[in-house]
Amino acid sequence: MALKYLEVAQDIAKKINTGAYTNKLPSEGQLMQLYGVSRNTIRNALNALFNQGMLKRIQGSGYFVNEALYHNHDIINMANKYGLRDLEKDAPIQSKTLFLEIIPADAKLAAHLKIKPQSEVYHLKRLRLRQDELICLEESFYRRDLVPYLTTDICNGSIFHFIKEQFNIVGHVTDTYLSLHYTTPAENELTNIPVNQAAIKVEEVHSQKNEQPFDYSISYYYLPDVTFYARTVNHLNN
């Protein structure tokens, strides 16, 4: 069961994503009354949203919805971990599973997932599209000791939603690495993107609250104008 402040934070995030809140949020007192919770609960919820880059706070004025520096619609917020849901304002993101198989983890993959070599993992490749426009090619590896069951139909939807509901696995910490990548002949066969075209490679290790990884993924983004946004708060120089 989610902590109360997380329930409040998730509801406020939903209101932001649906446009119910577009500028300044209600005051702490108004939010306390709206949700029937304590001031500490509201402050914890607001802090969670602030740390994920969804809010900015102005001393003496309150909390405001954080507007991106760039106003193009192809923005992925690396902090809130909604991933491609940030691109759903015009049309929903669709997934097309290319293949799903069970393989033994090699030494490199085992190190990423903190498992023993040869341990079984689900290996998935799928395309992510918006109105038939290719956004990215995604390759993922899920630990079978934590995620014992996946199907193509599940992978055509939200995998994170499924594993949360079925296995109580929630991503809490993500290590993310971005690098420049040039498409390969193998990618060309899957995507029809020309070979040697520049793309953004995003590697991520998703872990639970106990720092136990459950997924390692590599995504190649082909959108020509995609922007990745992250907010950093320096707690060492308060």
Image (cartoon, rainbow, N blue to C red):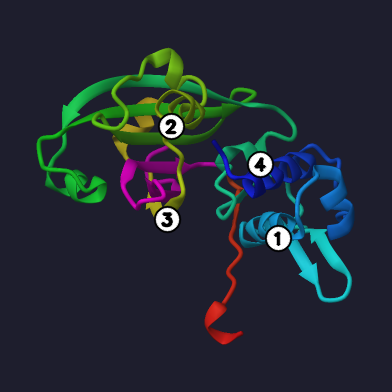
Badge 3 amino acid: Thr
Q: Earlier in the sequence, mark 3 or mark 4?
A: 4
Question: Label 2 belongs to which residue?
Answer: 168
Q: Nearer the viewer, residue 232 or 2?
A: 2
Residue 176: mark? 3
Provide the residue span drawn in magenta: 194-223
Badge 1 amino acid: Asn
Q: Nearer the viewer, residue 206 or 44?
A: 44
Residue 138 at x, y = what percent?
41, 35
**Viewport quadrant of the N terminus:** top right
Q: Residue at x 58, y 38 (%)?
A: 84
Identify the secondary structure beneath mark 4. helix
Q: CA distance from mark 1 to mark 2?
A: 26 Å
Identify the secondary structure beneath mark 1. helix
Residue 40: mark? 1
Q: Earlier in the sequence, mark 3 or mark 2?
A: 2
| Circle 3 Cα neighbour tier, 10 Å, few/some/many (<14 / 14–19 / ≥20) | few
Badge 4 amino acid: Glu
Residue 98 at x, y = what percent?
37, 20
Question: Label 4 belongs to which residue?
Answer: 7
| Circle 1 Cα neighbour tier, 10 Å, few/some/many (<14 / 14–19 / ≥20) | few
